[in-house]
Image (cartoon, coloured by chain):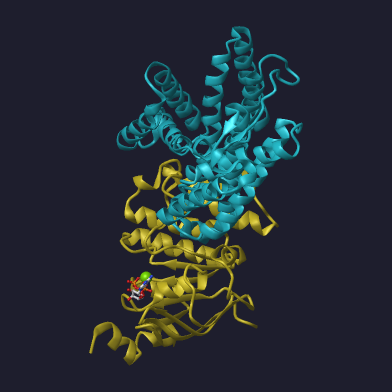
Chain colours: A cyan, B yellow
Amino acid sequence: MGSVPFALALVCVAAALFAVGRWLNISYAFFAAYVVVQYIVLGTAWNILGGYTGYVNFGITAFFALGAYSSVVLYKLVPSLPLPIMMVVGGIVAGLVGLGTGYLTLRLRGVFFSIATLALAVVVQTLITNWDFVGGARGAYVLRPRVAPLIGGDYIQYLFLLMLGLCVIALTTARAIEHSALGYGFAAIRDDEGAAEASGVPTLRLKLIATVLSGGFMGMAGAPLPYYVTYLDPSSGFSLNYAVNAIAMPLIGGTSSWLGPVVGAVLVGGLQEYIRVTISSAVNVLVAGVLLVVFVVLAPEGIVGLFRRRRR
Amino acid sequence: MTPLLQISGLGKRFGGFTALQAIDLDVQEGERLGLIGPNGSGKSTLVNCICGTLRHDLGSVRFGGKPLDGLAAHQRTRGGLARSFQLPRPFGTLSLAENLRIPILYAVNARGEGGLAGPAIDARCRDLLAEVGLADKAHRLPRDLTQIEMRKLELARAMAAQPKLLFADEVMAGLSHAEIDEIIALLFRLNGQGVTVIMIEHIMRAVMQFSQRLAVLVAGRKIADGKPADVVRDAEVVRAYLGE
Ligand SMILES: Nc1ncnc2c1ncn2[C@@H]1O[C@H](COP(=O)(O)OP(=O)(O)OP(=O)(O)O)[C@@H](O)[C@H]1O
Ligand SMILES: [Mg+2]
């Protein structure tokens, strides 16, 4: 299947999901589904760098929160700015930061790169916590319009629709990469960077492309967050949840294809939501962590990998 | 005519250890050069320095008349240098055919003229695998190969980059008599198509049969360079190989 038919198929699935939601018309369903779709985007974004090129990024919250705080800044400057534009801006900001950190850190291999990204998350969090304009440690309030623009109904429906749209774009991008020269170049880097160079692969440039795409999608996923939570402070914007889930979900679902992060996010995100309602949200990280360990030990190729192997 | 490859005064150190010292070597276009020397004499290090996997410390390397200094390894490959790794370094998660696809996509197609697309790439991968006798394993992963088959894959991947100059770094180690003859014939064919070949090999039968010229490295220095028959009779070479 080409990229265009694939994107159209995704749009149909997304439209069907949204239609079912509208028909059910339960606010809670939209709130819960938003989180799952957001994690599909985050997991897909992480996977473009971590799964395809093998560079493990621990600094997810830096990119995600940059998107969220870009929206806070824009909200304070131009409150009437449409949210899709804020998402694009958040994506550009996070993508540029990805380019910068990539340029500084991508010469580091393996675990050293991961530690550098962890440091980035700490640096960005410290800067934002000390930036009064966006509320600093106190946090910032964002007034959410009661009614959704364009589509009417509850505003959460609008947020969900935007996240669905972003998800379609992210998945289409990820799948297009897999089937392109870029995807082969990424795989070569993941397998053996020196051999990739010797085969003509411009490794630094490809890694920068991956970092920009990955960071950009994380930023776009974070941009609607202030409107979702209405009160954003550093501890919620930089929550460990995002980092753990964005890594755990692709690894559980399988890192070798676009489908992995989807399966992982639906499964783990769904389970977390169920436990949050029945027990407590405090165990969210634990759920992802335990599943992650189980999969890394028993099925390192993830759920998608398990099915592939069976088919062979 | 300017030589295709001009190495002058090349030096390489690993910490306090001098791996290569004041190497001068010219290789003409279309030549078949054998490069021999005892274990640890610096043959692979020389390949690494020329192809950009390692940076040399002293001297200069010119390829096609242009200096290579400062060029990244991938730029040198695109410029027409290709090498096999002595210890095979296949792309482990890609099938054999996909392994060959990488240099086609990133070296051959990056040169602009004569790029391949779609089915032409698949056909080229199949042909190359057939040339080294791995056609029936095109869709297997490298981990299904023996060490010897991996050496053949290394050679095929280097050939896939369509180089002007090919380094074959011990691709024949462990092969049977008949297989060695096949690889020699393959390298002769490549050379017939205009590819300059530098063969690094411990199997003297192959080196003597293939090379028009022989260079000898001992402990990081070039101690002999000339007609193969003369070089192997050279007193210093004999001493280096057979001991005092
Ligand atoms: N990356 C490295 N770091 C430190 N020392 C190295 C490195 N690579 C090679 N050496 C050393 O440099 C010397 C030359 O090694 P090289 O691999 O070039 O020898 P060679 O002639 O290819 O030997 P062989 O015939 O066994 O392949 C050896 O003593 C080796 O231990
Ligand atoms: Mg060697």
Viewport quadrant of the N terminus of chain A: top right
Q: Percent from the top left, x then y, of residue B125?
A: 53, 48
Please, is residue B167 above or below residue A136 in the view?
below
Let me know if residue B105 appears in the view: no
Q: Nearer the viewer, residue B214 or A275?
A: A275
Give me the residue at 37% from left, 63% from top.
B172
Give me the residue at 48% from left, 80% from top.
B57
User: In this image, A144 relative to B151: left or right?
Assistant: right
Viewport quadrant of the C terminus of chain A: top left
Q: Percent from the top left, x then y, of residue B77?
A: 56, 64
| Quarter of image, res A33 | top right
For this orientation, the residue located farthest to the bottom is: B235
Let me know if residue A33 appears in the view: yes
| Quarter of image, res B110 | bottom right
Give me the residue at 53% from left, 33% from top.
A258
User: In this image, A227 relative to A58: left or right?
Assistant: right
Q: Percent from the top left, x then y, of residue A49?
A: 52, 45
How many numbered marks does the figure carry?
A: 0
Please, is residue A195 above or below residue B44 in the view?
above
Please, is residue A310 above or below residue B188 in the view?
above
User: In this image, A251 relative to A93: left or right?
Assistant: left
| Quarter of image, res B214 | bottom left
Q: Nearer the viewer, residue B211 or A149?
A: A149
Q: Percent from the top left, x then y, of residue A84?
A: 71, 32
Q: Nearer the viewer, residue B23 or A16?
A: A16
Q: Nearer the viewer, residue A269 or B238?
A: A269
For this orientation, the residue located farthest to the top is: A23
Quadrant of the image where one finds ligand 1:
bottom left
